[in-house]
Amino acid sequence: MPLMTPEDLHRFLETEFPQAPPGIMVATVDDTTIRVRQKTEDRHLRPGGTISGPTLMAMVDCGFYLLLLSRLGPVAMAVTTNLNINFLRKPDPGHLVGEGRLLKLGKTLAVGDFTIWNEGETEPVAHATVTYAIPPKRQ
């Protein structure tokens, strides 16, 4: 069972990480997966009218961070050590849906992947692999 619910995760972002990308909402979370929704606006678009790469990368990073927190509890200092993203097709303006999977949770590293779709579409716009470093437990 996750240690943190979607409501707990939203509260954590509000109090501990207000710099997190705005507009990310957790829809569901369980032991190994998370589903998030990202509201996008004009500021998320790049020239040509597509959602920018940095917006997609921030969604991956924040979404996987929230998945990890749901398992570990509010460990604010867990940090990204690697994020590799493949942009598969042009994301149209509009909201995004992302799904992250925790593939391995070790003592010092967590590894997973994350897929993003335009809301309502079936073909993904991006896929990423992510590794996070987990801080040692304090005595």
Image: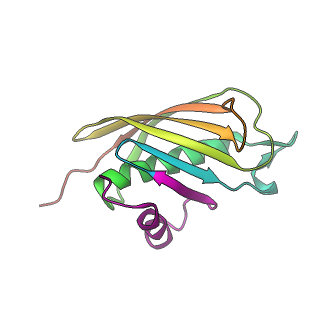
Residue 102, image quadrant? top left
Q: How many marks?
A: 0
Residue 65, placed above or below residue 113: below
Q: Residue at (60%, 42%) from the top-left corner?
A: 57
User: Does the stretch in magenta take in 5?
Assistant: yes
Residue 96 is inside the magenta segment: no
- The location of residue 136, given as percent across then percent down, is 21, 50
User: In the rendered image of this protein, does residue 83 appear above or below residue 46?
Assistant: above
Q: Position of residue 5 (x, y in %)?
A: 40, 61
> Where does residue 12 sit, x and y in percent of width and height?
43, 67
Residue shown at 52%/47% (left/top)? 35
Quarter of the image with the C terminus is bottom left
Report the front residue among 131 and 31: 31
Q: What span is in magenta?
A: 1-28
Q: Position of residue 96 (x, y in %)?
A: 68, 46
Residue at the extreme bottom: 15
Q: Along the horizontal axis of the image, is 86 left or right of 5?
A: right
Judged left or right of residue 8, residue 127 is: right
Which residue is painted at 41% across and 66% down in the image?
8
